[in-house]
Image: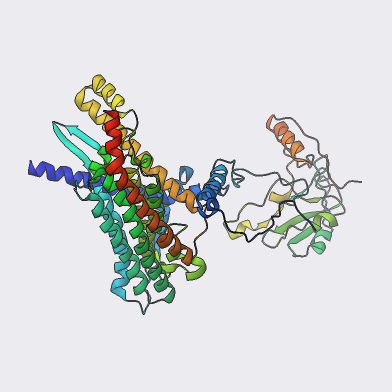
Amino acid sequence: MELTEFIIKTLTILVVFVLTLVIAMYSTWGERKVAGFIQDRMGPNRAGPGGLLQPLADAGKMFFKEDFIPALASKWLFIAGPSLAMLTALLASAVIPFGSTFRYNGVEVVLQGVESNIGILYVFGVVALGVYGIMIGGWASNNKFSLLGAIRAASQNISYEVAMGLSLIAILMMSSSLSLGEIVSQQHGGNWNIFYQPLGFIIFLTCSFAECNRVPFDLPECETELVGGYHTEYGSMKLGFYLFAEYINMFVSSAIISTLYFGGYNYPGMDWVYNQLTAAMGTTTGHNIATLIGTGVFFGKALFFIFFYMWVRWTLPRFRYDQLMNLGWKKLIPLAIINIIITGASVLFLKPYISSLLN
Amino acid sequence: MQLTNRSKQVSNKEMTLMERAYLPAIATGMAITLKHFFKKKVTIEYPEVKRYLGPVFRGRHILKRDAEGRERCTACGLCAVACPAEAISMIAAEREKGEEGLYREEKYAAVYEVNMLRCIFCGLCEEACPKQAVYLRHDEFIPVFDDRNQVIWGKDLLVEDMNNRYTREAWTKEEARLLDLKRANGESTNVVPRAIP
Protein backbone atom coordinates (compact mmCIF):
# COMPACT_ATOMS: atom_id res chain seq x y z
CA MET A 1 0.00 0.00 0.00
CA GLU A 2 2.83 2.32 0.90
CA LEU A 3 4.57 1.49 -2.38
CA THR A 4 1.46 1.98 -4.56
CA GLU A 5 0.78 5.29 -2.87
CA PHE A 6 4.38 6.32 -3.53
CA ILE A 7 4.12 5.31 -7.20
CA ILE A 8 0.79 7.12 -7.60
CA LYS A 9 2.18 10.27 -6.02
CA THR A 10 5.30 10.11 -8.19
CA LEU A 11 3.14 9.73 -11.28
CA THR A 12 0.86 12.66 -10.35
CA ILE A 13 3.85 14.87 -9.65
CA LEU A 14 5.43 13.87 -12.96
CA VAL A 15 2.20 14.61 -14.81
CA VAL A 16 1.87 17.99 -13.09
CA PHE A 17 5.53 18.76 -13.87
CA VAL A 18 5.23 17.86 -17.54
CA LEU A 19 1.91 19.72 -17.87
CA THR A 20 3.44 22.85 -16.37
CA LEU A 21 6.37 22.67 -18.77
CA VAL A 22 4.20 22.06 -21.82
CA ILE A 23 1.81 24.85 -20.94
CA ALA A 24 4.70 27.25 -20.30
CA MET A 25 6.26 26.20 -23.60
CA TYR A 26 3.11 26.86 -25.55
CA SER A 27 2.52 30.10 -23.66
CA THR A 28 5.56 31.49 -25.48
CA TRP A 29 3.88 30.56 -28.75
CA GLY A 30 0.56 31.91 -27.47
CA GLU A 31 2.15 35.16 -26.35
CA ARG A 32 3.47 35.84 -29.82
CA LYS A 33 0.25 34.77 -31.48
CA VAL A 34 -1.79 37.02 -29.19
CA ALA A 35 0.64 39.89 -29.74
CA GLY A 36 0.33 39.43 -33.48
CA PHE A 37 -3.44 39.21 -33.46
CA ILE A 38 -3.80 42.29 -31.28
CA GLN A 39 -1.51 44.20 -33.65
CA ASP A 40 -3.44 42.99 -36.74
CA ARG A 41 -0.66 40.57 -37.66
CA MET A 42 -0.63 36.79 -38.03
CA GLY A 43 2.03 35.93 -35.46
CA PRO A 44 4.43 33.00 -35.97
CA ASN A 45 3.06 30.69 -38.68
CA ARG A 46 6.06 29.28 -40.49
CA ALA A 47 7.23 26.47 -38.17
CA GLY A 48 4.63 23.71 -38.46
CA PRO A 49 0.88 24.26 -38.86
CA GLY A 50 -0.03 27.59 -37.32
CA GLY A 51 3.54 27.95 -36.04
CA LEU A 52 2.99 25.19 -33.48
CA LEU A 53 6.59 23.98 -33.68
CA GLN A 54 7.88 27.48 -32.88
CA PRO A 55 8.69 26.68 -29.20
CA LEU A 56 10.84 23.74 -30.33
CA ALA A 57 12.65 25.94 -32.83
CA ASP A 58 13.22 28.58 -30.16
CA ALA A 59 14.52 26.02 -27.68
CA GLY A 60 16.83 24.61 -30.36
CA LYS A 61 18.16 28.07 -31.09
CA MET A 62 18.68 28.81 -27.39
CA PHE A 63 20.58 25.57 -26.80
CA PHE A 64 22.91 26.07 -29.75
CA LYS A 65 23.93 29.61 -28.86
CA GLU A 66 27.22 30.31 -27.16
CA ASP A 67 26.96 29.81 -23.40
CA PHE A 68 28.73 33.01 -22.47
CA ILE A 69 29.79 34.08 -18.98
CA PRO A 70 31.28 37.57 -18.56
CA ALA A 71 34.88 37.60 -17.33
CA LEU A 72 34.17 39.66 -14.20
CA ALA A 73 30.92 37.92 -13.30
CA SER A 74 30.70 35.74 -10.25
CA LYS A 75 30.63 32.52 -12.19
CA TRP A 76 28.92 30.23 -9.73
CA LEU A 77 26.14 32.65 -8.85
CA PHE A 78 25.76 33.60 -12.52
CA ILE A 79 24.70 30.01 -13.21
CA ALA A 80 22.79 29.70 -9.93
CA GLY A 81 20.51 32.63 -10.80
CA PRO A 82 18.53 31.14 -13.70
CA SER A 83 18.62 27.69 -12.07
CA LEU A 84 17.00 29.08 -8.96
CA ALA A 85 14.42 31.02 -10.97
CA MET A 86 13.47 27.84 -12.81
CA LEU A 87 13.47 25.71 -9.65
CA THR A 88 11.19 27.99 -7.64
CA ALA A 89 8.85 28.47 -10.60
CA LEU A 90 8.43 24.72 -10.98
CA LEU A 91 7.99 24.05 -7.25
CA ALA A 92 4.82 26.08 -6.86
CA SER A 93 2.55 23.98 -9.08
CA ALA A 94 2.89 20.97 -6.75
CA VAL A 95 0.05 21.93 -4.41
CA ILE A 96 -2.53 23.12 -6.93
CA PRO A 97 -5.62 20.88 -7.08
CA PHE A 98 -6.22 20.17 -10.77
CA GLY A 99 -9.40 18.18 -10.23
CA SER A 100 -11.35 16.24 -7.60
CA THR A 101 -10.55 12.52 -7.36
CA PHE A 102 -9.86 9.71 -9.76
CA ARG A 103 -11.16 6.21 -8.90
CA TYR A 104 -9.24 3.13 -9.94
CA ASN A 105 -9.73 -0.33 -8.47
CA GLY A 106 -11.34 1.18 -5.38
CA VAL A 107 -8.43 3.54 -4.77
CA GLU A 108 -9.19 7.25 -4.76
CA VAL A 109 -6.40 9.33 -6.30
CA VAL A 110 -6.49 13.05 -5.64
CA LEU A 111 -5.48 15.11 -8.68
CA GLN A 112 -3.03 17.22 -6.75
CA GLY A 113 0.73 16.84 -6.47
CA VAL A 114 0.94 17.21 -2.71
CA GLU A 115 -2.03 17.50 -0.38
CA SER A 116 -0.90 20.03 2.14
CA ASN A 117 -2.99 21.70 4.82
CA ILE A 118 -0.90 24.85 4.39
CA GLY A 119 -0.94 24.77 0.59
CA ILE A 120 -1.40 28.48 0.03
CA LEU A 121 1.39 29.37 2.48
CA TYR A 122 3.66 26.97 0.61
CA VAL A 123 2.83 28.72 -2.68
CA PHE A 124 3.56 32.09 -1.14
CA GLY A 125 6.84 30.91 0.31
CA VAL A 126 8.00 29.48 -2.99
CA VAL A 127 6.88 32.50 -5.01
CA ALA A 128 8.71 34.79 -2.57
CA LEU A 129 11.84 32.70 -3.14
CA GLY A 130 11.49 33.34 -6.86
CA VAL A 131 12.91 36.82 -6.52
CA TYR A 132 16.23 35.31 -5.35
CA GLY A 133 16.78 33.92 -8.82
CA ILE A 134 16.51 37.39 -10.29
CA MET A 135 18.50 39.03 -7.47
CA ILE A 136 21.37 36.56 -7.64
CA GLY A 137 21.49 36.64 -11.43
CA GLY A 138 21.40 40.43 -11.54
CA TRP A 139 24.08 40.83 -8.90
CA ALA A 140 26.35 38.12 -10.29
CA SER A 141 26.40 39.76 -13.74
CA ASN A 142 28.63 42.56 -12.36
CA ASN A 143 26.76 45.10 -14.48
CA LYS A 144 25.09 48.29 -13.28
CA PHE A 145 21.99 47.78 -15.38
CA SER A 146 21.60 44.20 -14.22
CA LEU A 147 22.02 45.24 -10.61
CA LEU A 148 19.46 48.03 -10.96
CA GLY A 149 17.01 45.61 -12.56
CA ALA A 150 17.56 43.10 -9.79
CA ILE A 151 17.06 45.73 -7.09
CA ARG A 152 13.88 46.87 -8.77
CA ALA A 153 12.64 43.29 -8.97
CA ALA A 154 13.36 42.74 -5.29
CA SER A 155 11.73 45.93 -4.02
CA GLN A 156 8.75 45.49 -6.32
CA ASN A 157 8.17 41.90 -5.27
CA ILE A 158 8.45 42.74 -1.59
CA SER A 159 6.05 45.69 -1.92
CA TYR A 160 3.43 43.79 -3.82
CA GLU A 161 3.71 40.65 -1.73
CA VAL A 162 2.37 42.64 1.21
CA ALA A 163 -0.77 43.72 -0.62
CA MET A 164 -1.13 40.24 -2.10
CA GLY A 165 -0.93 38.59 1.30
CA LEU A 166 -3.43 41.04 2.77
CA SER A 167 -5.91 40.46 -0.04
CA LEU A 168 -5.50 36.75 0.50
CA ILE A 169 -6.25 37.04 4.22
CA ALA A 170 -9.83 37.99 3.36
CA ILE A 171 -10.19 34.70 1.46
CA LEU A 172 -8.66 32.79 4.37
CA MET A 173 -11.10 34.44 6.79
CA MET A 174 -14.00 33.27 4.64
CA SER A 175 -12.80 29.72 4.14
CA SER A 176 -10.99 29.40 7.51
CA SER A 177 -8.52 27.03 5.88
CA LEU A 178 -5.09 27.30 4.33
CA SER A 179 -5.47 24.16 2.25
CA LEU A 180 -6.02 24.85 -1.44
CA GLY A 181 -8.07 21.65 -1.80
CA GLU A 182 -10.34 22.81 1.03
CA ILE A 183 -10.70 26.32 -0.43
CA VAL A 184 -11.69 24.86 -3.79
CA SER A 185 -14.21 22.38 -2.41
CA GLN A 186 -15.90 25.19 -0.48
CA GLN A 187 -16.61 26.91 -3.80
CA HIS A 188 -18.73 23.98 -4.97
CA GLY A 189 -20.85 24.62 -8.05
CA GLY A 190 -21.10 28.29 -8.90
CA ASN A 191 -20.44 29.49 -5.35
CA TRP A 192 -17.16 31.15 -6.34
CA ASN A 193 -15.16 33.50 -4.13
CA ILE A 194 -15.10 36.20 -6.80
CA PHE A 195 -18.74 37.01 -5.94
CA TYR A 196 -17.78 37.68 -2.31
CA GLN A 197 -14.35 39.20 -2.89
CA PRO A 198 -14.41 41.37 -6.04
CA LEU A 199 -12.09 43.98 -4.50
CA GLY A 200 -9.78 41.31 -3.14
CA PHE A 201 -9.69 39.73 -6.57
CA ILE A 202 -8.65 42.97 -8.28
CA ILE A 203 -5.90 43.54 -5.71
CA PHE A 204 -4.71 39.95 -5.99
CA LEU A 205 -4.70 40.12 -9.80
CA THR A 206 -2.75 43.39 -9.84
CA CYS A 207 -0.23 42.02 -7.38
CA SER A 208 0.22 38.79 -9.29
CA PHE A 209 1.03 40.85 -12.38
CA ALA A 210 3.72 42.59 -10.33
CA GLU A 211 4.97 39.30 -8.85
CA CYS A 212 5.38 37.76 -12.30
CA ASN A 213 7.23 40.88 -13.54
CA ARG A 214 4.71 41.22 -16.34
CA VAL A 215 3.64 44.39 -18.12
CA PRO A 216 2.57 46.92 -16.80
CA PHE A 217 4.93 46.09 -13.90
CA ASP A 218 7.91 44.74 -15.87
CA LEU A 219 10.30 47.39 -14.56
CA PRO A 220 13.07 44.87 -13.74
CA GLU A 221 13.57 44.31 -17.48
CA CYS A 222 12.58 47.76 -18.61
CA GLU A 223 14.55 48.00 -21.83
CA THR A 224 14.08 51.74 -22.27
CA GLU A 225 15.97 52.45 -19.06
CA LEU A 226 17.97 49.36 -18.17
CA VAL A 227 19.02 47.81 -21.50
CA GLY A 228 17.74 44.33 -20.64
CA GLY A 229 17.36 44.66 -16.87
CA TYR A 230 18.52 41.75 -14.73
CA HIS A 231 19.18 39.50 -17.75
CA THR A 232 21.30 42.01 -19.71
CA GLU A 233 24.39 39.80 -19.51
CA TYR A 234 22.57 36.55 -20.12
CA GLY A 235 22.41 34.65 -23.35
CA SER A 236 21.83 31.13 -24.56
CA MET A 237 19.67 28.79 -22.49
CA LYS A 238 20.40 30.68 -19.25
CA LEU A 239 18.40 33.56 -20.69
CA GLY A 240 15.95 30.96 -21.94
CA PHE A 241 15.48 29.69 -18.38
CA TYR A 242 14.74 33.19 -17.08
CA LEU A 243 12.13 33.75 -19.79
CA PHE A 244 10.75 30.25 -19.33
CA ALA A 245 10.49 30.74 -15.56
CA GLU A 246 8.39 33.85 -16.23
CA TYR A 247 5.95 31.80 -18.28
CA ILE A 248 5.81 29.06 -15.67
CA ASN A 249 5.11 31.72 -13.03
CA MET A 250 2.36 33.03 -15.26
CA PHE A 251 0.74 29.61 -15.46
CA VAL A 252 1.10 29.02 -11.73
CA SER A 253 -0.42 32.36 -10.82
CA SER A 254 -3.24 31.85 -13.34
CA ALA A 255 -3.91 28.49 -11.73
CA ILE A 256 -3.82 30.06 -8.24
CA ILE A 257 -6.21 32.83 -9.28
CA SER A 258 -8.68 30.36 -10.73
CA THR A 259 -8.31 28.18 -7.63
CA LEU A 260 -8.79 30.97 -5.11
CA TYR A 261 -11.40 33.11 -6.83
CA PHE A 262 -12.98 31.15 -9.68
CA GLY A 263 -13.71 27.84 -8.00
CA GLY A 264 -10.89 25.77 -9.51
CA TYR A 265 -12.52 22.70 -11.05
CA ASN A 266 -16.03 23.70 -9.93
CA TYR A 267 -18.56 24.91 -12.44
CA PRO A 268 -22.29 25.64 -12.26
CA GLY A 269 -24.41 22.54 -12.82
CA MET A 270 -21.61 20.14 -11.89
CA ASP A 271 -23.86 18.12 -9.58
CA TRP A 272 -26.36 17.55 -12.37
CA VAL A 273 -23.58 16.47 -14.75
CA TYR A 274 -22.14 14.18 -12.05
CA ASN A 275 -25.51 12.53 -11.37
CA GLN A 276 -26.19 12.05 -15.06
CA LEU A 277 -22.77 10.53 -15.68
CA THR A 278 -22.80 8.21 -12.67
CA ALA A 279 -26.34 7.09 -13.55
CA ALA A 280 -25.34 6.39 -17.13
CA MET A 281 -21.90 4.82 -16.67
CA GLY A 282 -21.66 3.59 -13.11
CA THR A 283 -19.97 5.11 -10.10
CA THR A 284 -16.40 4.49 -11.27
CA THR A 285 -16.38 5.52 -14.93
CA GLY A 286 -18.98 8.23 -14.41
CA HIS A 287 -17.04 9.69 -11.50
CA ASN A 288 -13.80 9.65 -13.48
CA ILE A 289 -15.37 11.34 -16.49
CA ALA A 290 -16.96 13.99 -14.26
CA THR A 291 -13.49 14.58 -12.75
CA LEU A 292 -12.00 14.91 -16.21
CA ILE A 293 -14.62 17.49 -17.17
CA GLY A 294 -13.81 19.40 -13.95
CA THR A 295 -10.09 19.28 -14.79
CA GLY A 296 -10.89 20.57 -18.26
CA VAL A 297 -12.86 23.43 -16.75
CA PHE A 298 -9.94 24.20 -14.42
CA PHE A 299 -7.48 24.35 -17.31
CA GLY A 300 -9.94 26.46 -19.29
CA LYS A 301 -9.96 29.01 -16.48
CA ALA A 302 -6.18 28.92 -16.07
CA LEU A 303 -5.64 29.33 -19.82
CA PHE A 304 -8.08 32.22 -19.87
CA PHE A 305 -5.99 33.98 -17.24
CA ILE A 306 -2.81 33.28 -19.19
CA PHE A 307 -4.54 34.89 -22.15
CA PHE A 308 -5.54 37.76 -19.87
CA TYR A 309 -1.90 38.29 -18.89
CA MET A 310 -0.97 38.54 -22.56
CA TRP A 311 -3.97 40.70 -23.38
CA VAL A 312 -2.95 43.17 -20.68
CA ARG A 313 0.67 43.04 -21.81
CA TRP A 314 -0.23 44.20 -25.32
CA THR A 315 -2.63 46.86 -24.08
CA LEU A 316 -1.05 48.76 -21.21
CA PRO A 317 2.12 50.83 -21.16
CA ARG A 318 4.68 50.29 -18.41
CA PHE A 319 4.35 52.16 -15.12
CA ARG A 320 6.97 54.60 -13.94
CA TYR A 321 8.84 53.42 -10.88
CA ASP A 322 7.30 56.01 -8.52
CA GLN A 323 3.85 55.21 -9.88
CA LEU A 324 4.51 51.56 -9.18
CA MET A 325 5.47 52.25 -5.57
CA ASN A 326 2.58 54.68 -5.07
CA LEU A 327 0.11 52.16 -6.39
CA GLY A 328 1.53 49.39 -4.23
CA TRP A 329 1.92 51.16 -0.91
CA LYS A 330 -0.63 53.98 -1.02
CA LYS A 331 -3.51 52.38 -2.88
CA LEU A 332 -3.43 48.59 -2.84
CA ILE A 333 -2.34 48.04 0.77
CA PRO A 334 -4.96 50.40 2.31
CA LEU A 335 -7.61 48.92 0.02
CA ALA A 336 -6.59 45.42 1.06
CA ILE A 337 -6.82 46.38 4.75
CA ILE A 338 -10.27 47.88 4.21
CA ASN A 339 -11.23 44.70 2.42
CA ILE A 340 -10.08 42.64 5.42
CA ILE A 341 -12.13 44.78 7.82
CA ILE A 342 -15.25 44.56 5.67
CA THR A 343 -14.84 40.82 5.25
CA GLY A 344 -14.25 40.36 8.97
CA ALA A 345 -17.36 42.38 9.83
CA SER A 346 -19.41 40.44 7.30
CA VAL A 347 -18.21 37.09 8.59
CA LEU A 348 -18.94 38.16 12.18
CA PHE A 349 -22.26 39.97 11.80
CA LEU A 350 -23.75 39.70 8.31
CA LYS A 351 -23.35 35.95 7.86
CA PRO A 352 -25.17 34.93 11.10
CA TYR A 353 -27.86 37.52 10.30
CA ILE A 354 -28.47 36.18 6.79
CA SER A 355 -28.44 32.56 7.94
CA SER A 356 -30.92 33.41 10.70
CA LEU A 357 -33.13 35.06 8.08
CA LEU A 358 -32.94 32.00 5.85
CA ASN A 359 -33.80 29.54 8.64
CA MET B 1 -5.82 77.02 -37.11
CA GLN B 2 -7.52 73.67 -37.05
CA LEU B 3 -5.90 71.03 -39.22
CA THR B 4 -7.86 67.96 -38.16
CA ASN B 5 -10.99 67.39 -36.12
CA ARG B 6 -9.21 64.81 -34.01
CA SER B 7 -7.18 67.23 -31.91
CA LYS B 8 -8.08 67.42 -28.24
CA GLN B 9 -7.75 70.40 -25.93
CA VAL B 10 -5.26 69.52 -23.21
CA SER B 11 -6.34 70.51 -19.73
CA ASN B 12 -4.65 70.35 -16.38
CA LYS B 13 -7.76 69.92 -14.28
CA GLU B 14 -7.96 67.53 -11.34
CA MET B 15 -8.92 64.02 -12.38
CA THR B 16 -12.29 62.77 -11.25
CA LEU B 17 -12.49 59.72 -9.00
CA MET B 18 -13.55 57.65 -11.99
CA GLU B 19 -10.43 58.71 -13.87
CA ARG B 20 -8.17 58.20 -10.88
CA ALA B 21 -9.48 54.67 -10.36
CA TYR B 22 -7.72 53.83 -13.64
CA LEU B 23 -9.70 50.62 -14.07
CA PRO B 24 -12.41 52.01 -16.41
CA ALA B 25 -9.68 53.39 -18.66
CA ILE B 26 -7.96 50.00 -18.65
CA ALA B 27 -11.24 48.32 -19.57
CA THR B 28 -11.68 50.71 -22.52
CA GLY B 29 -8.15 50.00 -23.70
CA MET B 30 -8.63 46.24 -23.37
CA ALA B 31 -11.86 46.47 -25.37
CA ILE B 32 -9.94 48.19 -28.16
CA THR B 33 -7.22 45.54 -28.23
CA LEU B 34 -9.82 42.77 -28.11
CA LYS B 35 -11.56 44.34 -31.10
CA HIS B 36 -8.28 44.24 -32.99
CA PHE B 37 -7.76 40.63 -31.87
CA PHE B 38 -10.80 39.55 -33.89
CA LYS B 39 -10.21 41.88 -36.81
CA LYS B 40 -9.28 40.56 -40.21
CA LYS B 41 -5.50 40.56 -40.50
CA VAL B 42 -3.92 42.80 -43.12
CA THR B 43 -0.96 40.47 -43.70
CA ILE B 44 -0.44 39.13 -47.23
CA GLU B 45 1.44 35.85 -46.79
CA TYR B 46 3.93 36.60 -49.51
CA PRO B 47 5.39 33.48 -51.07
CA GLU B 48 1.98 31.78 -51.06
CA VAL B 49 -0.14 34.82 -51.87
CA LYS B 50 1.11 37.40 -54.33
CA ARG B 51 -0.51 40.71 -54.68
CA TYR B 52 -1.06 42.38 -58.06
CA LEU B 53 1.59 45.05 -58.38
CA GLY B 54 0.06 47.00 -61.28
CA PRO B 55 0.77 47.06 -65.00
CA VAL B 56 3.90 49.19 -64.68
CA PHE B 57 5.75 46.93 -62.26
CA ARG B 58 9.21 46.04 -63.58
CA GLY B 59 9.92 42.37 -62.99
CA ARG B 60 11.96 39.83 -64.99
CA HIS B 61 13.14 40.56 -68.50
CA ILE B 62 11.67 39.08 -71.65
CA LEU B 63 12.89 39.21 -75.26
CA LYS B 64 9.76 39.53 -77.38
CA ARG B 65 8.96 37.76 -80.60
CA ASP B 66 6.67 39.25 -83.20
CA ALA B 67 3.29 37.84 -84.23
CA GLU B 68 4.94 35.31 -86.54
CA GLY B 69 7.26 34.11 -83.84
CA ARG B 70 10.42 35.88 -85.07
CA GLU B 71 12.77 37.43 -82.54
CA ARG B 72 12.52 41.19 -82.59
CA CYS B 73 16.02 41.90 -81.24
CA THR B 74 18.59 43.09 -83.77
CA ALA B 75 21.50 43.26 -81.35
CA CYS B 76 21.90 47.02 -81.85
CA GLY B 77 23.29 47.31 -78.33
CA LEU B 78 21.25 50.37 -77.31
CA CYS B 79 19.92 48.58 -74.25
CA ALA B 80 23.43 47.70 -73.17
CA VAL B 81 24.49 51.30 -73.62
CA ALA B 82 21.46 52.60 -71.74
CA CYS B 83 21.91 50.18 -68.87
CA PRO B 84 23.29 52.12 -65.86
CA ALA B 85 24.33 48.93 -64.11
CA GLU B 86 26.05 47.46 -67.17
CA ALA B 87 24.11 44.28 -66.74
CA ILE B 88 23.43 43.53 -70.41
CA SER B 89 25.90 42.03 -72.85
CA MET B 90 25.32 40.57 -76.28
CA ILE B 91 27.05 39.13 -79.32
CA ALA B 92 25.55 39.98 -82.69
CA ALA B 93 25.34 37.63 -85.65
CA GLU B 94 24.16 37.84 -89.26
CA ARG B 95 21.01 36.02 -90.29
CA GLU B 96 21.72 33.10 -92.65
CA LYS B 97 19.48 32.06 -95.52
CA GLY B 98 16.59 29.96 -94.29
CA GLU B 99 16.50 31.62 -90.90
CA GLU B 100 13.92 34.23 -91.93
CA GLY B 101 11.31 32.48 -89.81
CA LEU B 102 13.50 32.81 -86.73
CA TYR B 103 14.78 36.37 -86.85
CA ARG B 104 12.89 39.42 -88.00
CA GLU B 105 15.85 41.52 -89.18
CA GLU B 106 19.10 40.65 -90.95
CA LYS B 107 21.08 40.98 -87.76
CA TYR B 108 20.23 39.24 -84.52
CA ALA B 109 21.64 38.56 -81.07
CA ALA B 110 23.38 35.22 -81.03
CA VAL B 111 24.04 35.68 -77.32
CA TYR B 112 22.01 37.98 -75.10
CA GLU B 113 22.83 37.89 -71.43
CA VAL B 114 21.48 39.81 -68.44
CA ASN B 115 23.39 39.64 -65.18
CA MET B 116 20.55 39.53 -62.66
CA LEU B 117 22.82 40.50 -59.76
CA ARG B 118 23.76 43.72 -61.55
CA CYS B 119 20.34 44.60 -62.93
CA ILE B 120 18.53 47.26 -60.94
CA PHE B 121 15.22 46.85 -62.79
CA CYS B 122 15.16 50.51 -63.81
CA GLY B 123 13.55 49.77 -67.19
CA LEU B 124 15.92 51.97 -69.21
CA CYS B 125 16.62 49.06 -71.60
CA GLU B 126 12.90 48.85 -72.30
CA GLU B 127 12.84 52.55 -73.15
CA ALA B 128 16.04 52.43 -75.23
CA CYS B 129 14.92 49.55 -77.42
CA PRO B 130 13.91 50.78 -80.90
CA LYS B 131 12.41 47.40 -81.84
CA GLN B 132 10.14 46.82 -78.83
CA ALA B 133 12.18 43.69 -78.19
CA VAL B 134 13.08 43.85 -74.52
CA TYR B 135 10.51 44.28 -71.78
CA LEU B 136 10.39 43.92 -68.02
CA ARG B 137 7.44 41.69 -67.19
CA HIS B 138 4.88 43.12 -64.79
CA ASP B 139 3.73 39.70 -63.57
CA GLU B 140 6.89 37.75 -62.71
CA PHE B 141 9.83 38.19 -60.40
CA ILE B 142 13.37 36.91 -60.76
CA PRO B 143 13.41 33.84 -58.54
CA VAL B 144 15.76 33.65 -55.56
CA PHE B 145 19.25 32.45 -56.54
CA ASP B 146 20.81 29.58 -54.68
CA ASP B 147 23.75 29.02 -57.02
CA ARG B 148 26.07 31.42 -58.80
CA ASN B 149 25.42 29.89 -62.22
CA GLN B 150 21.80 30.93 -61.95
CA VAL B 151 22.76 34.59 -61.94
CA ILE B 152 23.44 35.25 -65.62
CA TRP B 153 20.34 34.67 -67.71
CA GLY B 154 20.86 33.75 -71.34
CA LYS B 155 18.51 33.63 -74.29
CA ASP B 156 17.11 30.26 -73.17
CA LEU B 157 15.45 32.00 -70.24
CA LEU B 158 14.78 35.39 -71.78
CA VAL B 159 13.21 34.74 -75.21
CA GLU B 160 9.45 34.62 -75.21
CA ASP B 161 7.65 31.28 -75.46
CA MET B 162 5.11 31.42 -78.31
CA ASN B 163 2.78 29.02 -76.49
CA ASN B 164 2.68 31.26 -73.44
CA ARG B 165 3.02 34.79 -74.72
CA TYR B 166 3.48 37.74 -72.45
CA THR B 167 0.82 40.42 -72.71
CA ARG B 168 0.13 43.48 -70.68
CA GLU B 169 -3.62 43.55 -71.10
CA ALA B 170 -4.52 44.02 -67.50
CA TRP B 171 -4.13 47.63 -66.48
CA THR B 172 -6.23 47.46 -63.35
CA LYS B 173 -6.58 44.95 -60.53
CA GLU B 174 -10.01 43.91 -61.78
CA GLU B 175 -8.74 43.35 -65.30
CA ALA B 176 -5.85 41.34 -63.93
CA ARG B 177 -8.27 39.14 -62.02
CA LEU B 178 -10.41 38.63 -65.15
CA LEU B 179 -7.31 37.81 -67.16
CA ASP B 180 -6.22 35.26 -64.56
CA LEU B 181 -9.67 33.67 -64.81
CA LYS B 182 -9.44 33.62 -68.60
CA ARG B 183 -6.00 31.99 -68.47
CA ALA B 184 -7.21 29.47 -65.92
CA ASN B 185 -10.07 28.53 -68.29
CA GLY B 186 -7.56 28.04 -71.11
CA GLU B 187 -8.95 30.85 -73.27
CA SER B 188 -6.55 32.68 -75.58
CA THR B 189 -5.66 36.26 -74.79
CA ASN B 190 -4.56 39.00 -77.18
CA VAL B 191 -1.05 40.29 -77.46
CA VAL B 192 -0.96 44.06 -77.14
CA PRO B 193 2.63 45.31 -76.84
CA ARG B 194 2.72 48.51 -74.91
CA ALA B 195 4.87 51.05 -76.71
CA ILE B 196 3.76 50.67 -80.36
CA PRO B 197 2.63 54.00 -81.75
Question: Going by the image, does B26 lie left or right of A275?
Answer: right
Q: Quadrant of residue A276?
A: top left
Residue B180 image point, x, y percent: 71, 35
Q: How many marks?
A: 0
Residue reaching furthest left?
A: A1
Q: Observer-nearest residue: B6 or B19?
A: B19
Residue A328 image point, x, y percent: 41, 60
Q: Residue at x 19, y 48 (%)?
A: A116
In the displayed structure, A143 sits above or below B8; it is: below
Q: Quadrant of residue A247?
A: bottom left
Q: Observer-nearest residue: A294 or B56?
A: A294
The answer to whether residue A59 is visible is no
Q: Observer-nearest residue: A103 or B72?
A: A103
The answer to whether residue B79 is visible is yes
Scheme by which the image is coloured: rainbow
Residue A283 image point, x, y percent: 20, 25
In the displayed structure, A75 sits above or below B88; it is: below
Question: Going by the image, does B46 lie left or right of A28?
Answer: right
Residue B130 image point, x, y percent: 87, 54
Q: Residue at x 79, y 47 (%)?
A: B64
Quarter of the image for the C terminus of chain A: give it. top left
